[in-house]
Image: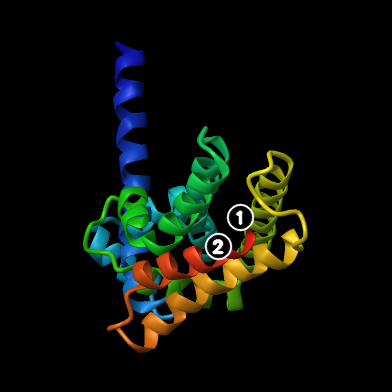
Amino acid sequence: MYTEQYNVKLGYMMQTKNTIMDTSFTLFVDKGFTDVSINDILQHAKITKGAFYHHFKSKDELIVSVAEKYIFTFFDNMLEQLRTCQICVKEKLILFFEMFSNREAIIHEVCKNNDLQFKHFYFLLMEGQKKYDFISDYRCRFYAQIKEFLVELLEQGKTSCKLKTNFDSHAIALQILASIEGAFFLQLVDEQVEVSKVSSTSFKMIWNSISR
């Protein structure tokens, strides 16, 4: 009986913690980290101040948990899918371009929110990167890992004789990243820009320049 009551209480506590994090993330995306107060979170999550401080010592501690659950998980999932898929070099490069040009679908899956626009998520990321070292450090590590992944993939293509050998894999990896990020930045200022089409064109141009 005691164990059952404990499990019920534990489940309720975890549900409350998840509610706080889910509500906070929605508010952060809408208003930014800075403009959301603990009172805002209490009001929208419909919890008491005591319940909040039972799970989080401060707003900053909450932000760390929210970043790990939503922002870091989003990027980690992308990298994990790319690393583990068993397909040829060309198909993996195509998948890379498709994933990075369709990040909104991935963020919907991670955050369980089909109304979330990636550009709002991105603006929150930019604010977090500027204000919090742990977010900035993570983002730098992520892009270093992505570049390393691309370099290894290109070198693999050279070894398997699918790609030419007379190009700099590091330079091409940077070109790939720049083309994708550049398309996304253009869409931020001009909503008529279709990232998927720009990315598809970029892939074809890069692939034609490095394939045998």
Assess whether mark 1 and mark 2 are in contact (beta carbons under 8 angstroms).
yes
Real-space CA distance between mark 2 and mark 1, rounded to the nearest whole angstrom: 6 Å
Where residue 170 sits: x, y (%)?
74, 62
Residue carrying label 2: 208
Q: Specify the label residue 211 is tagged with.
A: 1
Q: Is 95 on the left or on the right of 19, as rendered?
A: right
The residue under label 2 is which amino acid type?
A: Asn
Determine whether, in the image, residue 203 is placed left or right of residue 46: right
In the rendered image, the quadrant that contains the N terminus is top left
Spot occupied by residue 95 in the image (x, y as percentages of width and height): 45, 50
Q: Which mark is residue 110?
A: none
Q: At 37% from the left edge and 46% from the top edge, which residue is drawn?
A: 17
Q: Residue 89 placed where, x, y %? A: 57, 44
Whether 70 is drawn above or below 168: the answer is above
Q: Residue at x 49, y 41 (%)?
A: 81
Q: Residue at x 36, y 22 (%)?
A: 6
- The residue most toward the front is 212
Left or right for 95, reference 210 = left
Residue at horizontal 28%, vertical 50%?
Answer: 112
Furthest-top residue in this view:
1
Mark 2 closeness class: few <14, some 14–19, many ≥20 residues within 10 Å: few
Q: Is 205 in front, or is 55?
A: 205
* Front in this rendered view, residue 143 or 97: 97
Tag 2's secondary structure?
helix
In the image, residue 138 sits, relative to residue 191, either above or below, namely: above
Amino acid of disc 1:
Ser
